[in-house]
Amino acid sequence: MTQLHGVVPPVCTPLTPERELDVPSLERLAAFLIEAGMHGLFVTGSTGEVAYLPDETRYRALEVVAGVAAGQVPVLAGIIDTTTPRVIEHAKASKAAGADALVATAPFYAPTHPVEFPGHFRAIRAAVDLPLVAYDIPVSVGHKLPTDVVLELAEDGTFAALKDSSGDLDGLRAVLERTEHLVCFSGSETLADLGLFIGAHGLVPGIGNVDPHGYLRLYEAAMRGDWAAAKTEQSRLRRLFEIIYVGDARGMGRYSSAIGAFKEGLVARGVITGGTTSEPMIPLNDTERAAVRSHLADAGLL
Amino acid sequence: MTQLHGVVPPVCTPLTPERELDVPSLERLAAFLIEAGMHGLFVTGSTGEVAYLPDETRYRALEVVAGVAAGQVPVLAGIIDTTTPRVIEHAKASKAAGADALVATAPFYAPTHPVEFPGHFRAIRAAVDLPLVAYDIPVSVGHKLPTDVVLELAEDGTFAALKDSSGDLDGLRAVLERTEHLVCFSGSETLADLGLFIGAHGLVPGIGNVDPHGYLRLYEAAMRGDWAAAKTEQSRLRRLFEIIYVGDARGMGRYSSAIGAFKEGLVARGVITGGTTSEPMIPLNDTERAAVRSHLADAGLL
Amino acid sequence: MTQLHGVVPPVCTPLTPERELDVPSLERLAAFLIEAGMHGLFVTGSTGEVAYLPDETRYRALEVVAGVAAGQVPVLAGIIDTTTPRVIEHAKASKAAGADALVATAPFYAPTHPVEFPGHFRAIRAAVDLPLVAYDIPVSVGHKLPTDVVLELAEDGTFAALKDSSGDLDGLRAVLERTEHLVCFSGSETLADLGLFIGAHGLVPGIGNVDPHGYLRLYEAAMRGDWAAAKTEQSRLRRLFEIIYVGDARGMGRYSSAIGAFKEGLVARGVITGGTTSEPMIPLNDTERAAVRSHLADAGLL
Amino acid sequence: MTQLHGVVPPVCTPLTPERELDVPSLERLAAFLIEAGMHGLFVTGSTGEVAYLPDETRYRALEVVAGVAAGQVPVLAGIIDTTTPRVIEHAKASKAAGADALVATAPFYAPTHPVEFPGHFRAIRAAVDLPLVAYDIPVSVGHKLPTDVVLELAEDGTFAALKDSSGDLDGLRAVLERTEHLVCFSGSETLADLGLFIGAHGLVPGIGNVDPHGYLRLYEAAMRGDWAAAKTEQSRLRRLFEIIYVGDARGMGRYSSAIGAFKEGLVARGVITGGTTSEPMIPLNDTERAAVRSHLADAGLL
């Protein structure tokens, strides 16, 4: 899977005011990201509100993005569900909808033991012949993928890649040190430079929807070993990332604020039409939307 | 919803060796539980492997149980999914499949703030006109339903009932003290007597699949205030419940061991045909199955 | 240790406005509790601000209480410190200061594995010849005492008793079912009736400082099997216990509010002179102190 | 406090077989570290078994190290205890014993709210006139120091420095971005290069006892911006750090294995006489000690 690398943003899912998929906006967003030089697109990830989207919306979003990508860059599909049989259903439907690779987490909701993880991922890999990306996201699933499990499944060909959203750079570093058979992505927006410094091959930054060029600069600086430039770009992006806190004063949840801010940022930049988010997320109010725009202006994006 | 009360076991979902729904076994199980005097049946709960079942299997299981129940006892359906839009889809399909009431958890996977919970549950209640049961299960969803939220949604009619699987008897007691508009069920197998002692109206014991008569005796003793008898029955059931640990020596997960043991117990009692569990659960081996039967024999069930 | 049983409140440690030990107040408090029929006194427990008291204050408080008790009831001393060598120092000093039994937790601060717990407790027991009470308080030490460890150390005579402040009634029940060599105390103020219902031999309620007669009534009702009376008394005490939340509106910590409320309650009842708490706890303000008194009036204590 | 910076290892506390302070070994260790170019010495930290040492042993160890240092490098003293009044006692005694700076954590054992943290640290700073270092170690105290609290106490002069053992590089980066009034140390052995990359001023690596020259090379490479060299040295030190896992096969605790390995490494290098650790830590066996030596040989240290 030589083409998996680089900046692969988790694509936002634009919705109409009635919370239907906004196809023209999604087409514009996919085109915007490809033109910005993104190395791949990750559809129906956490940033794409996968946990909120009915199945048909998930697959339709994937079709739309795959249509725009048209083979220019690989399209990864999140196949996020509680356990193996349900994940396999998403895997099959996602392949049919045009996915080039599949992104799966460990089981969740059902208390699951790490000893069951290999069976879970191997069954998915066996069911659908597409590269499988391990999605390590303990904040959502409640447990971290153990390094041993990741290495075992990298060595036997189950995993083609790893998207690390665990925040555990020590664990990611251990994986990078111990295998050459795994393409590793950092899911961090704010420590992306550190992920690349320790050897990660790419980034999956949610706010890359809003500022893909910034993450491309960061990635390219890192690839040429210019760590000072990477760090400077990261500092700028860290300030921009503070848009996710616009809703804190009202005490709304993390996703309400962050997903709302990403979408409002895309509206502000003229990429998508509206910033509607899924239920039960709380919509940003006028003050919060203005704060997002102010951050974008400070970052030179408006 | 006067008929919601009493012992309402979360019905196991028998599977064929190929992991398809075993309809004849499920019919026998539903009939066995109704004949044993259960006051309701809870389909597609955690014990029913809801997190492992594809949608069609969920709804088919519900249809089968509703068909056997035929109005003799209410059938509750777990509508377990990550967030509001996906849960509402299950709510609609479950109503169509014959559910008398719906059981929903707080959102999971997507980090959600308690401030978003009321909107979540109200949207579900508004979408489908069936009594809604709040399912408080922090071990699966990652956060406890705050007492204030439960009370608010009881008072405004969103919640008809609460299934408390939080293990927090102090919190359940606070709810029972502060509202008369909520039917409260304890989800504990091992502290069921304590739940009833503090005023809960019913029980949802997973191992009630295997020994419904025991939980009925416990419930009836509690209802007549014979706490010594309730405690004695509970002690017997606590020993039986140790079947969930048969897999511990092999280090398998909690569900693999517990669900496997419940199903093997039903096989041993001649109710269902086979003990197959969903992927990625690890099947019990011969030693473990023998241990389950030994526990049942000790409990006088064979 | 036949005399360990019944209601054994964790005695508050009255302080002067300069945060010195208020000896006359402590003498009055000890006398008040003994006259109220308490079966023992637990000095330098969590409620006694043990974690805030310098060593000399700890031992002086113990001497004062032991002097008042004068053998009428056993005096238990909390020997709370991070690991074995430090705990043993407290054990020796506490015996010298008049303790009849010692109360020790698992190690804390230093990450410790359960496999090290037996060595910890056995070394303490070997160092000082007094009955040893296991203090299971995961909220403070970060891990629960495993049932197997408690049973092993009960059977070999290391533990004479257990004070369970874990909130895990299921675990306490398992201990009670499996050994007859351990006197078990529930540390819960709000589920004390449940602790006695499952077989616990006594209670260690912090708010027992303020209303010892209430907990005595609860205990005696339980001992004679009058569960309805026990439950009624518990309900009254649950309402009283809400004094611990008086500081919530200001967002102070749990201890600031609870310890402040217990002490203010004792001031209101005329037992101690002032409600000063240790640094860095935040003192109650006038509104909060009035709220405490209002709760006491409602409970019939003023 | 201009001299606080660079590599400041948390000095091990050598013990005799009878678990008394081994003064000659400690003198040799302090001299070894100073000769290796360490920029300071941190006595009675977690690696120094502070949580296991009686008060007199703590202060004697500090005196010994301060005596060897004799003003050549600053000596920091951990004043680790549960809450303010007890910490202040250690602060006074540590100043008397020769400390140049004091290192204090947030309160532990007593459930404490972040709103109480400023009062805690300000009272310590006010009680003893020495630079105060905030020790952020959530694994031991149960909560992370909030960024806002750290910044507030840096700005008002309460904190001179921060030792970050939280593993949260994102939080450390936020502190570094927002204040210039704080000397920041990373407590990580395995991500020390990343800490310096984001701007930290120094390191406090436990295994720096065993290989101070390695951490000095890493630090100096980072200071001259040679990130490739820093990373190479870090990789070597990561392999060496695996000595902390020698006890894993026996299932002992983290500290038993890590502290035992550090001490055995110092024995192997001829610096201290014996590897005895405090109770209740489990001593390394012959196999485990041989494994430590094998790691040191691989790292070129024998």
Image (cartoon, coloured by chain):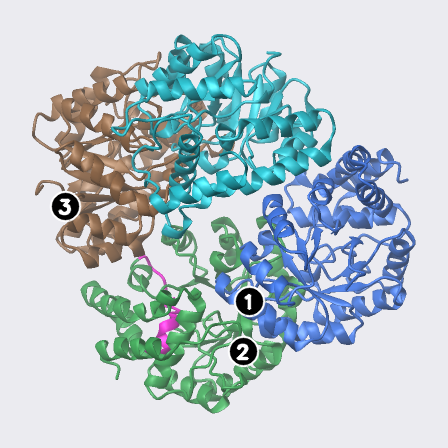
Chain colours: A green, B blue, C cyan, D brown
User: Which percent across, then down, holds residue B38?
Assistant: 85, 53
Which residue appears at 62% of the width and 23% of the height?
Answer: C151
Q: Amino acid at mark 2?
A: Ala
* Above or below, A294 relative to D70: below
* Quarter that holds the N terminus of chain B: bottom right
Q: Quadrant of residue D108?
A: top left
Split into 4 quadrants, where in the image is the C terminus of chain B? top right
Report helix, strand or loop for mark 3: loop
Q: Is residue B34 magenta?
A: no
Residue B149, picture quadrant: bottom right
Residue B189 occupies quadrant: top right
- Circle nearer the viewer, 3 or 1: 1
SS type, badge 1: helix
Closer to us: mark 1 or mark 2? Answer: 1
Q: Mark 3: which amino acid? A: Gly
* Residue C22 at x, y percent in the picture: 32, 22
Circle 2: element type:
loop
Q: Is residue C66 visible?
A: yes
Q: Which residues are magenta?
A: A198-211
Marks 3,1: beta carbons within 8 A = no
Does mark 2 fall on the same chain as mark 1?
Answer: no
The residue carrying mark 3 is D157
| Location of residue D205 with respect to B34 vertically, above or below | above
Q: Mark 2 touching mark 3, by CB under 8 A?
A: no
Q: Name the residue type under label 1.
A: Pro
Position of B159 relative to A67 (above/below) = above
Q: Tell me the number on the disc at residue B243.
A: none
**Mark 1 — residue?**
B118
Q: Is residue D144 visible?
A: no
Indicate the position of residue C18 as horizontal and vertical percent values. Answer: 25, 28
Residue C257: % across, % down: 40, 41
